[in-house]
Each structure stands twice: as structure tokens, then as C-alpha cells.
Image (cartoon, rainbow, N blue to C red):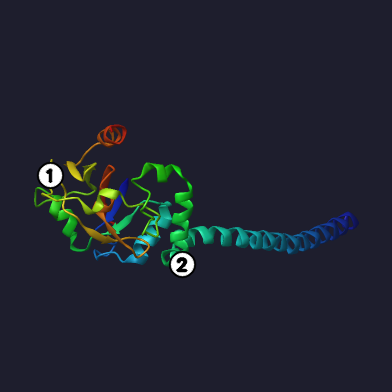
Amino acid sequence: MIMNVIIEDESGNAPNQADLQAWSNNFGLTMPVLADPNYRVLSSYATSSSIGLPFTVLIDRGVVVESVDYPTVDDAVRLLRAR
Amino acid sequence: MSAPRQVLGVGLLLLLGACSNVPKVDPRQSRGDSDDDDVVDTADTGRDSGGTETGDTGSVDSGGGTDTGGGTDTGGGTDTGNASPYTGGWTVDACSDSVRATGNRVGQVSQDFALLDQYGDTVVLHDFCDRVVWLVFAAFW
């Protein structure tokens, strides 16, 4: 499952529900599109003070953090296929 | 020369007139279609409501009933008792209440979070404890 976590709107403010809905509608997203005000969740995973976007966190079954920062699509596919 | 031009002009007018009449028909047809769409949408809405707005209330759970009807999920056991509490229709894994977070570093069990989604629901990470989750952080800019 992919979750798209939005930290800021175009103005640098935390996105509201309408923003998230417009975003998901615009791209036809059926996955959760979430707002992360003040980067609280993002910061909790980041290992350095400087963060680039997109920033990704891969979480395995059991909610075990598999990789942080820039996991590849191959990493995700590998985990999705493993069971 | 002028006669053929007049004929041509009249022909064009007639053609335009005919064309102007045609659209009057098409919108009706499209309306008819839209009505049909409305019907379909309504039906869909019934489903979506099941998962969307009204759905959160009661119809949604009914949708859950439909899923249960899937039987397959029921057999799965995991997804069974968990009719989706989310308007988006994402099911909750059975292990959601038993997850014990240890930290957000690699190899640790991630801390939980609860974030607003596009439907106005609050999505909880641990609800998806039995599947691979890929968080993609981004911004609109």
C-alpha cells in the first residue's frame, strides 16, 4: 500500500482536506493522501536535518521500518512479493 | 456568377440552420445520457456511499457486509471482522491493536501516526500492520 503524505501546499502551508481531495482527484489517486502538518511524521523518520523531497519510508509487514530516505521501486516490489 | 453565389449562400444558410438544429437534439441525448449516468452514478453512489459519505454512517458498513459476502475475505480471517472504517475503503488488519512500536529507525517497529486523509478521515498507520506500506512524502510546490 502506498500512502502519499503531503507536507505543504503551494503557499507553504499545511494542506487541508480540500487540498488533499483536489490532489487525489487531479491524479486519480485511490491511495490514502494524507496531510502532515509541520512535518511531524516526516521528521520522526528523517535521520538528518536536511530533507529532500520526495522523501520515502518503506515499512515492511509488522510495521517494521525497512528503509528510509530513498528506497528504490525495486525495494518495494521485493517486499511486496515476499511473504 | 451571382446566381450560383446566392445559391451557395442559401445552401450554407440551410446547412448552418440544419446544423443549428442538430445540436438541439444532441444535448437532449446527452442529457438523456446524463440522466442515465445519474442513475448509474446513483447506483455507484450507493456503493461509494457505502464507502464514502453516507457509507461511513451505515451504508458503508453494509458495503462491508458485501465484502464479507466475498467469502474469500471471510475465509482469510484477517480482513474479515474489519469492515473498513475508512471512506476510502481501506481495510484494517487484524494485528492493528497488537503492534508495539519501538522507534522509527530501520529495523524498529514504527511508531504509530494518525493523519487526515482526502476524505476527512484520520488514517492510522498501525491499521495496515499486515502489509507493506510505502510512505511517499511530497509537497504541492
* Residue located beneath label 1 in the image: B108
Residue drawn at 31 percent across, 32 percent down: A81
* Residue located beneath label 2 in the image: B54
Residue drawn at 40 percent across, 60 percent down: B87
Q: Which chain carries label 2?
A: B
- For the residues marked 1 and 2, what is the alpha-carbon distance in whole angstroms? 38 Å
Q: Nearer the viewer, residue B68 or B138?
A: B68
Find residue B80 and report its horizontal and vertical position in percent. 38, 49
Residue drawn at 33 percent across, 56 percent down: A33
The crowd level at tag 2 (other Cα within 10 Å; few <14, some 14-19, many 20+) is some
- Let me know if residue B77 appears in the view: yes
For residue B3, side relative to residue B63 (left or right): right
Q: Which of A53 and B75 is in front in this view?
A: B75
Q: Is mark 2 on a helix, strand or loop?
A: helix
Q: In this view, does B110 lie above or below B3?
A: above
Find residue B51 and report its horizontal and vertical position in percent. 44, 59
Give the quadrant of the N terminus of chain A: top left
The crowd level at tag 1 (other Cα within 10 Å; few <14, some 14-19, many 20+) is some
- CB of mark 1 within 8 Å of CB of mark 2? no
Residue drawn at 85 percent across, 60 percent down: B10
Judged from this view, the residue extending furthest toward the right is B3
Give the quadrant of the C terminus of chain A: top left
Q: Is mark 1 on a helix, strand or loop?
A: loop
Find residue A44 and report its horizontal and vertical position in percent. 13, 54
- Let me know if residue A8 appears in the view: no
For residue B10, side relative to residue A81 (left or right): right
Q: Mark 1 lies on which chain?
A: B
Amino acid, disc 1: Gln
If you read the primary sequence from the N terminus, does the residue marked by circle 1 or circle 2 appear first?
2
For residue A72, side relative to residue B36 (left or right): left
Amino acid, disc 2: Thr
